[in-house]
Amino acid sequence: MSARDDDLGTMDAGKLIDLFESGDASPLEATRAALDRIDRFNDDVNAYVYIDREGAEDAARASARRWGQGKPLSPIDGVPTSLKDLTEVKGMPARDGSLTTGTGKCDTDAPPARMLREAGAVLLGKTNTPEFGWKAVTDNRVFGATCNPWDTRLTPGGSSGGAAAAAALNMGVLHQGGDSGGSIRIPAAFTGVFGFKPTFGWTPQWPPAKMPTLSHLGPLTRHPRDAARMLNVMGRYDYRDPYATRGQPEDWGVDLECDLRGLRIAYSPDLGYADVDDQIAARVKEAALKLEDLGAEVVEVNPAFKSPIDIFRKLWFTASLQVWDRCDEKGRELLDPGLVANAKHAQNWDALELFDAFSERAELTLALEKFNQDYHLLMTPTVPLQPFEVNHEVPPGSGMRDWEEWAPFSYPFNLSQQPAASVPCGFTDCGLPVGFQLAGGKFDDVRVLRAANAYMAAYPARFPAVPNPAQYG
């Protein structure tokens, strides 16, 4: 083997596959390198909550045999992969970050696990999430908090914070997340990785999410190329998802090597209503200018819609109410107090108010789809603030009540069910990552990936070499 084991742990899927094909490295060596990084880093960041070492090595040996015979199952055969703890994986527990769930192992694979397994991906284990994915930071009463690799005193965001931290440190190469209000894009921005929320229904899930019409499954990776490789496997129809739709790209990465000429991008610094940290605003403005230098037409403009926070809360808090309502008294005492507070808030709404929220959601979707008739993509900051201390739902001292107040850029595109990505675009003065968001019209996923890839090819991201316990501040 020409590459050392520790080098394999830093590689993306494309480089690993080249080595598997040439015989210069094997999936077993790559898997052991990923497991070694988990051993070295996970105690500091708490990204993984379950590791299936024996199962991963067995899968890697089988993959090595296939590559040796020239018969890989797919272009990601043998690539180390993780799944979010909200996703059922046969032979692994699915605690959902909740004391109300059991410790038994699942007896079936949810769609993304099945598809990835059938493609030969090596399933390393499960990554951390808040209870049932209800908030945009990652901590729970079962496994504790996940920390940001750039400064372990800070949150990585959520709810796919475990996957994002794992991606930033390359504890595995491909990481599955879920996004009902920003849960892929927020942690991608806070940790400096690439996160993509596909068009609703194109990445099937089962069992259904707590608010199924908001939830999108997607990848968190170090680069859009690996995201496309992952989507070529898990971005396929599965009948078990009642909301699943067909029409996915045959190749999600078909346009990755295209430049940005001909793309018209609307750049909105604040969507007309958000308060953005000055340093984040500056990095995102610089990224808009760089996209223009790469050949895109970038126009500063705000789409004409008001903040949909009340619409989102009506749906999101009602999902918490359903969780609370289905628990007995003992179970309710075990739930995250913030989830319970949301549930009790939702008790005050009547059916007509919820119905009105669905109507207003449809109007917002129409407004965004109409906006995309004039612009191919909409660019915003991913989040308006820098990562804050772990074990807090909102920045301490901010006066905010819940996470929706500090994540105004993400959930509009869950309500509209449109594709959106977070792209790393530099750092604040104290060295914390910044990301910008690119959103497209429904089914314009390939275009979003194309633009993100062009930017990251020209301006490669930088990742932490090790978790930093107190580097900043």
Image (tube, rainbow, N blue to C red):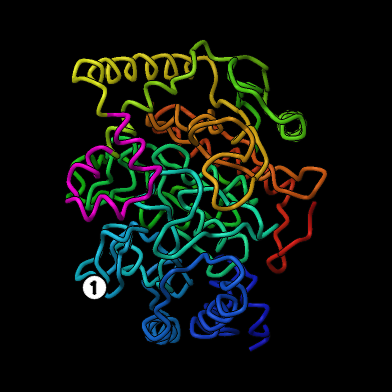
Quarter-wise, where is residue 197 in the image?
Answer: top left
Q: Does the magenta segment cover residue 332?
A: yes
Q: Pick the residue in front: 151 or 115.
A: 151
Q: Is residue 387 above or below residue 21?
A: above
Taking the image as shown, residue 52 lies to the left or right of residue 108, namely right
Taking the image as shown, residue 102 lies to the left or right of residue 434, namely left
Task: Look at the image and tell me in which quarter the N terminus lies.
Answer: bottom right
Quarter-wise, where is residue 427 in the image?
Answer: top right
Q: Residue at horizontal 39%, vertical 86%?
A: 54
Whether residue 303 is visible here, answered yes or no, is yes
Q: Residues within 10 Å of mark 1 (few under 14, many from 20)?
A: few
Q: Residue at horizontal 64%, vertical 23%?
A: 275
Q: Residue at horizontal 40%, vertical 21%?
A: 310
Residue sticking out furthest to the top: 304
Whether residue 267 is visible here, answered yes or no, is no
Quarter-wise, where is residue 200 in the image?
Answer: top left
Q: Pick the residue in front: 26 or 415.
A: 415
Q: Does the magenta segment cover residue 287?
A: no
Q: What percent of the width, then of the height, locates residue 279?
A: 77, 34
Q: Is residue 140 above or below residue 384?
A: below
Q: What percent of the width, then of the height, locates residue 229?
A: 47, 57
Q: What percent of the width, then of the height, locates residue 434?
A: 69, 42
Type of residue at label 1?
Gly
Q: Which residue is mark 1?
A: 104
Q: Pick the residue in front: 195 or 445.
A: 195
Q: Give the magenta-colored segment's residue range.
A: 321-346
Q: Secondary structure at mark 1?
A: loop
Q: What percent of the width, then of the height, locates residue 356?
A: 26, 15
